[in-house]
Each structure stands twice: as structure tokens, then as C-alpha cells.
Image: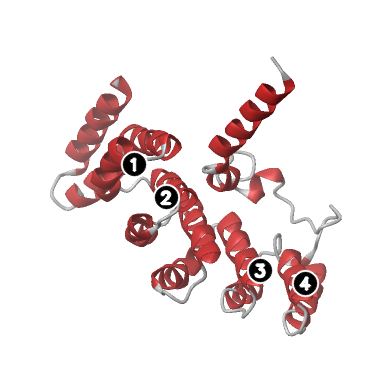
Amino acid sequence: MSRSVFALVAVSMAGLLMVPALARAQFSPVSRNPMLQGNDQLDDSGRRAGKETDENVVRDATKGLEDASPKVRIDALNKLRFVHSAKAEDLLLRGLADPDVRVKVKAVDILGARQITEAVPTMCQYLFLRSTEPVVKLHIAAALGRIGDARGALPVMQYMEEAGEERGRGTAVYALGELGDPRATDLLTKTATDDPSPQVRQLAQEALEKIEGELPIQRVVQAAKNDRKLMPTDERLSKLREMDAELHSH
């Protein structure tokens, strides 16, 4: 293969991989839950962070977020990544309203990585606002999928329908697959057949498979909750066993 042909192939492959890159990076099994990388809280240098150290980090981050430099504010948010406290979460939420887009994106990404459900209402609000920067909306869609709270499903669906560019649609589709909400099935089915991008169509098909393959256990749990007051305990347990057996037979 000549060098010119090889270069053309390389450029084409890069273009195909670019669409779901953000989504796949944010949802990778290794990075999905930072807590899986060590149950002990670690600071950036890998040292064990005790209560006193966490308090110092929060104090420094609070001061850093008041700095005029966006870089300093980003560094302040980074320090909070592995600090698990209400004060740290409040500071991360404050970052969503930062005037600098880079700081907003950093706050969104960390909130998503930490799977902080308290951030969902605010993220959904920013996803609806026309004044929210496109890149921030892109990262919010990914973060909502990563958090996995059902409240994020409808906002992500609306964002997906309004997203004009390929990367936004691909990220939204991937997020809907992670959210696993059956309300997205019709939209994903249409996307899997009609979207002009082959990569987005593939992501939509994968999202549908996640919903059909992984969501039934959620339906079992919900059905059990709905029937809890209607059936005696033995009958309820028997029904759950039947549903569980049916689920695992597929």
C-alpha cells in the first residue's frame, strides 16, 4: 500500500472514531466508578487522605475557586475529585455556574465521574437552556448517562433530537443506553435506522440492546414494588422467582 493511500485510510478511521470518542471514554469500564480504583480516598499524589487532609483540600479548593484565573479554578476542582464530603460536592456544583466554559466542563466531568445524583436537576436545567454552550451540553449529556439517574432520560432525549452535529447525537445515544430508560426505545429505534451517520446508527443499536438486555431486571424490581401490597409474602416470593427464571432464560 502506498504512503498516500495509507494516509487516506488513517484519516478516514480517525473520523469514524471521533463521534463516540467522548461517550466511550466517559463510560469506559475502568473509569466508570473512581471508587473501584481504591476504596481508600487518595489525593492526587496517591497518598492516603484522612479527614484532616480532606478538610485542607476543601479549604484550598474554596480559595482556588475564588481566583480570577480559570486555570486555578480548574485545578481547585481537580483537587476535589476524590474528596467525599458535602462541602466538596457543593463546590463542584458551584463550578457548573462558573463564567468560564472550561471550568464548567471540568465540574460536569467530575460530577459525572463521581455519579453525584444531586447534580442531576441542575444539569438537566442547563441542558434545556439555549444560553448553555454546546460543548457544555455535550459533556452534560455524557455525565447524565454516567450518573444513571432516570431523571436525566427525557432531557437527554430532547438534547439528542436538537443536536445538529454527529458527536452530540452519538454521545446522547450512548448516554440513553446507559440510562436504560424504555421511554427512549422509539427514539433509538428511529435513530438506528434513519440517522445519516453509520456510527450513530451503530451506537443506537447498541443502546437498544442494553435496554432490552439489561433493563428487565429493573422492571422485575419495579413490578415487585407495585405488587408488594397486593400479594401475601409467599406468593410474592414465588412470583419473583418466576420472573427471575424467565429473565435468565433469555
Between 49 and 18, the one lying in front of the other is: 18
Of the two numbered discs 3 and 1 on the same chain, state the one appearing first in sequence: 3
Closer to the observer: label 4 or label 1? 1
User: Upstream in the sequence, badge 4 or badge 2?
Assistant: 4
Q: Mark 1 and mark 3 in contact (Cβ < 8 Å)?
A: no
Task: Indicate the amino acid at tag 4.
Answer: Lys
Residue identified by numbered label 3: 102
As displayed, is residue 101 above or below residue 183? below
Residue type beneath disc 1: Asp
Amino acid on which the number 2 mark rests in the picture:
Arg
Q: Which residue is mark 1?
A: 195
Q: Of marks 3 and 2, which one's residue comes earlier in the chain?
A: 3
Residue tagged 2:
169
Kindly report the distance in space between the C-alpha atoms of the residues bearing marks 4 and 3.
9 Å
Indicate left or right for 16 with 80 as reference. Answer: left
- What residue is drawn where x is 25% and y is 25%? 246
Q: In the image, 193: left or right of 178?
A: left
What residue sits right under mark 4 in the picture? 71
Task: Compute the Cα span from label 3 to label 2.
Answer: 21 Å
Q: Are marks 2 and 1 in contact (CB under 8 Å)?
A: yes
